[in-house]
């Protein structure tokens, strides 16, 4: 009788505690990635000029900007629209900072090419 009760308890624990936590974690990861893509893309549109950063860097800048901006906006007591503007500004700043710090020099120095003899 005791093993059956323990088995039912373990099954219920898995069904009502573990699986919802896994589902929540997957949903959180998915929504974070989507927000990162959107905010990173909008951040790239806000920053003038062309940015030579990849997709993963754009997503990372968007996630960082939206996370920090959301925290700042929440603790400052702003509404949802102001939070979104703060997130967008910080995502754009992250894209600009990433572009400046990871820019490779193009056309500087001497490199031996096909035409160079």
Image (cartoon, rainbow, N blue to C red):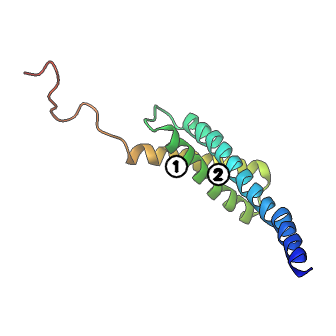
Percent x, y for residue 30? 69, 47
**Front in this rendered view, residue 110 or 27:** 27
Looking at the image, tell me whether mark 2 or mark 1 is earlier in sequence order. 2
Q: Residue lying at the far front in this picture: please name it.
A: 1
Camera-side residue of 92 and 5: 5
Q: Which residue is mark 1?
A: 94
List x then y, in percent, for residue 93: 53, 48
Q: In the picture, which quadrant includes the C terminus?
A: top left
Q: Residue at x 53, y 42 (%)?
A: 58
Q: Which SS class for mark 2? A: helix
**Relative horizontal placement of residue 1, taking residue 20 as reference (left or right):** right
Q: Secondary structure at mark 1?
A: helix
Label total for image: 2
**x then y, percent, for residue 82:** 74, 50
Quadrant (top left, top right, bottom left, bottom right) of the N terminus? bottom right
Instruction: Determine crowd level at label 1: few under 14, some 14-19, many 20+ residues with C-alpha closer than 10 A.
Output: many
Q: Position of residue 62 (x, y in %)?
A: 59, 46
The answer to which image quadrant residue 76 occupies is: bottom right
Mark 2 Cα-neighbour bin, 10 Å: few <14, some 14–19, many ≥20 = many
Residue under label 2: 66
């Amino acid at each position: 009788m005791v093993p059956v009760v323990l088995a039912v308890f373990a099954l219920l624990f898995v069904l009502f505690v573990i699986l919802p936590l896994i589902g929540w974690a997957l949903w959180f990861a998915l929504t974070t990635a989507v927000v990162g893509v959107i905010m990173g893309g909008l951040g790239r549109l806000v920053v003038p000029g062309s940015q030579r950063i990849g997709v993963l860097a754009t997503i990372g800048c968007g996630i960082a900007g939206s996370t920090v901006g959301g925290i700042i906006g929440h603790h400052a007591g702003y509404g949802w629209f102001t939070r979104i503007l703060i997130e967008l500004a910080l995502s754009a700043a992250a894209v600009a900072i990433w572009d400046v710090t990871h820019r490779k020099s193009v056309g500087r120095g001497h490199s031996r090419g096909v035409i160079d003899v």
